[in-house]
Image (spheres, rainbow, N blue to C red):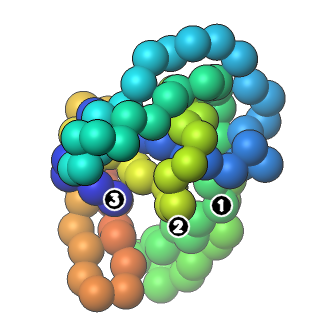
Amino acid sequence: MNPGTSAHFTSFESDFVDMNLNNYGQVETVNLRALLFIVASNTVLIEHEIFNSEKETTKVAMSKLWPVYYVLDIQMCFLSTGQILLSELRVENDKSSFTFYDKSGK
């Protein structure tokens, strides 16, 4: 997760369910001389764990993340902290993981 990104980004074409190719503009980076181009967008599937604290069980689930933008020449994926919070999730993290909670606190 990155608090500095305004949207979700990846440079891995294989992350997408399918892609809508288009000119979605440019991404401004910390190095202002290095503009990166957004060339597609659509849905990415994310595999994650859901922990039930009442039953102390964990299950693996698949969720859709949309919109995610395909940016050439970045070296990693970025999840936008702002977009996650706008979806009404609460986030807690430690050095090895992020935990998302819905409105009910689960």
Point out the frontmost of discs 2 and 1.
1
Between disc 2 and disc 3, whose residue precedes? 3
Mark 1: which secondary structure?
strand
Residue drawn where x is 52% and y is 27% of the image: 38
Is 68 in front, or is 63?
Answer: 68
Q: CA distance from mark 1 to mark 3?
A: 15 Å
Is 54 in front, or is 38?
Answer: 38
Q: CA distance from mark 2 to mark 3?
A: 18 Å
Percent of width and height locating residue 27: 37, 32
Which numbered disc covers residue 47? 1
How many callouts does the rendering have? 3
- Left or right position of 75 against 42: left
Look at the numbered discs 2 and 3 and tell me whether their residues touch, using CB distance below 8 Å.
no
Is 62 in front, or is 95?
Answer: 95
Q: CA distance from mark 2 to mark 1?
A: 10 Å
Rendered image quadrant of residue 95 = bottom left
- Left or right position of 2 against 70: left
Between disc 1 and disc 3, whose residue precedes? 3
- Disc 3 marks which amino acid? Met
Residue drawn where x is 78% and y is 36% of the image: 17
Residue labelled with disc 2: 50
Percent of width and height locating residue 46: 62, 54
Q: Rate crowding at label 2 as few (under 14), some (14 to 19) or many (20 or more) other CA atoms within 10 Å.
A: some
- Disc 1 marks which amino acid? Glu
Which numbered disc covers residue 39? none
Which numbered disc covers residue 1? 3
